[in-house]
Image: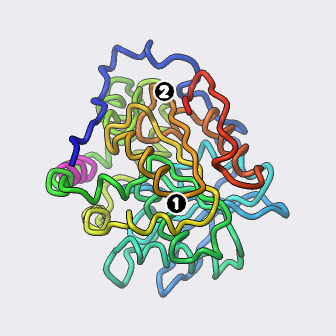
Amino acid sequence: MPRRVLSPPVAPWRTARAGHGYGVGGGPDWRSVDWPSHLRRVEVDGTPVNYVDLGAGDREPVVFVHGLGGQWQNWLENLPRVAEERRALALDLPGFGLTPEPRDEITIPGYGRTVNAFCEKLGLGGVAIVGNSMGGFIAAEVAIQFPSRVTRLVLVSAAGISSASSLRRPMLTAGRIMTAVATNTVARHRALASRPVMRHLSLALVARYPKLLRADLAYEGLFKGAGKPSFDDALRACLDYGFRDRLPDVSVPTLIVWGENDWVIPVRDANEFERLIPDSRKVVMRETGHIPMAERPQAFNDVLMDFLAETGPAEEKEPVEGEAQVA
């Protein structure tokens, strides 16, 4: 198997390389939203699932699925934009955010069933699903297991290719170290977020230029989800499951979005997803890490909304090259 190529974290004083658009809000400003009024709970397979629900419209809803160590707030910069045109929902997966741990063992197929049951319980019908990292792994699993549920699929730096490779042991070790750090610093997260250098050092594994992210976004959208007890089990679930041979079964238009400088999952995995999913295309954002939706929310939201508005095959509508992205 070829060597896994990763882009190492950048030094905190190299922010000039970020170029145009890094950290620029996606609009409408998430800070103006009365989030508590949009928070809900629904019981799914015996687990009370915490989620946020805003927007309306006749078009299919959009369901956002966070990644490992995340929570629904990972999508703060994106939910208000989608909610301008259609219903937008984001859940805390069992064991993360404010959703308690599931009764059964955590697995990727199990999480896929949870997301489908969540949609069923709320009567959503067909939905577009957007998933980041482990959330992308789960989103693709939903599309494979429940093809009538998913109308369009967006994979953002998705796990499922390299994470199931021979690198499982070092990834597990790194994951445990990250969990320990997060757990020991939960009480200090607001202070870490407010100090640019500390923000950079704390988030350098997932964001290319953490110093350029707003402090409140770093705290609300990234730090608050860290240190959950299900992290280790969910990481093992990612490493113990593979679905490469089933990706050709994804039968809906699929958009693959990646950061060119992703340290967690190599950008070459975007090529593999595109090769294996029949009707798919990719967008790779320059000078961007593992969380493009938070690092370049304006560019991400533009690409996402264009994709959601499309009809017909995804592969026939190649994105126009822009300053923040390459096809």
Q: Is residue 39 left or right of residue 163?
A: right
Please state the horizontal and vertical placement of residue 114, each as a whole percent of the image.
Answer: 50, 77
Label 1 belongs to which residue? 65
Q: Is residue 98 visible?
A: no
Q: Looking at the picture, does residue 198 appear above or below residue 180?
A: above
Instruction: Please tell me how crowded label 2 is: few (under 14), some (14-19), or many (20+) other residues with Cα within 10 Å.
Output: many
Instruction: Please tell me how crowded label 1 is: few (under 14), some (14-19), or many (20+) other residues with Cα within 10 Å.
Output: many
Please state the horizontal and vertical placement of residue 49, each as a whole percent of the image.
Answer: 52, 74
Residue 179 located within the stretch drawn in magenta: yes
Q: Looking at the picture, does residue 107 appear above or below residue 292?
A: below
Which residue sits at x=31%, y=69%? 241
Q: Is residue 68 left or right of residue 121?
A: left
Which residue sits at x=57%, y=53%? 154
Label 2 belongs to which residue? 286
Q: Nearer the viewer, residue 256 or 249?
A: 249
Residues at marks 1 and 2, CA–CA distance in whole angstroms: 23 Å
Q: Amino acid at mark 1?
A: Val
Residue stretch rendered in magenta on the structure? 174-183
| Mark closer to the observer (1, 2) | 2
Q: Nearer the viewer, residue 144 or 138?
A: 144
Magenta span: helix, strand or loop, mainly? helix
Residue that protrudes farthest toward the right in the picture:
58
Q: Looking at the picture, does residue 267 appear above or below residue 237?
A: above
